[in-house]
Amino acid sequence: MGMQFEDLEAWREARRLVAQIYLLTRDEALSRDFRLCSQIQSAAVSIMSNIAEGFERTGKAEKLQFYNIARSSCGEVRSQLYVVEDVYPSASATAKDIRDSEVSSVGRLITGLIFSTQKR
């Protein structure tokens, strides 16, 4: 059997990011902001899902479309983490750490996927 989406470093990192976002949104004060929690969780899951969906597509244009959606969801998560950082002091440091490390890493990996797909 060939490579699967689970073998992609970008997908594995996105999976870790989802877990970190879910842990973050358990913060006592933040967890009461249902809309923000739902939005940031959904955007994080979108990253992971769109990497998988893009990988499973056979057409280059389709692959790129899903990888680009994953990358834009990365931007959405990054932006929402600023809201957490600015509005919820108890979760601020963790939000900043996730944004600076994990989200940036996932974004770079997705960009790499996009470039390697374009070259094929």
Image (cartoon, rainbow, N blue to C red):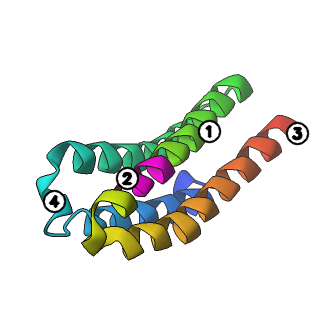
Residue density around tag 2, few if under 14, some if 14–19, many if 20 or more, within 10 Å = some
Span shown in magenta: 77-83
Name above or below for residue 92 compared with residue 104. Answer: below
Observer-side mark, 2 or 4, equals 2
Residue 35 location (% of width, % of height):
20, 42
Quadrant containing the C terminus in the rendered view: top right
Secondary structure type for disc 2: helix
Question: Rounded to the nearest whole Å, what is the CA distance between mark 3 and mark 4?
Answer: 43 Å
Disc 4 marks which residue? Answer: 31
Q: Earlier in the sequence, mark 3 or mark 4?
A: 4
Disc 3 marks which residue? Answer: 119
Disc 2 marks which residue? Answer: 83
| In this rendering, position of residue 4 left or right of residue 112 | left
**Residue at position x 77%, y 40% from top?**
117
Observer-side mark, 4 or 1, equals 4
Q: Is residue 80 magenta?
A: yes
Secondary structure type for disc 3: helix
Q: Earlier in the sequence, mark 2 or mark 3?
A: 2
**Residue at position x 65%, y 32% from top?**
63
| Residue 8 visible in this rendered orientation of the protein | no
Residue 10's disc number: none
Residue 70 location (% of width, % of height):
54, 41
Q: Earlier in the sequence, mark 1 or mark 2?
A: 1
Q: Is residue 81 magenta?
A: yes
**Residue at position x 54%, y 60% from top?**
103
Q: Amino acid at mark 4?
A: Ser
Observer-side mark, 1 or 2, equals 2
Q: How many marks?
A: 4
Observer-side mark, 3 or 4, equals 4
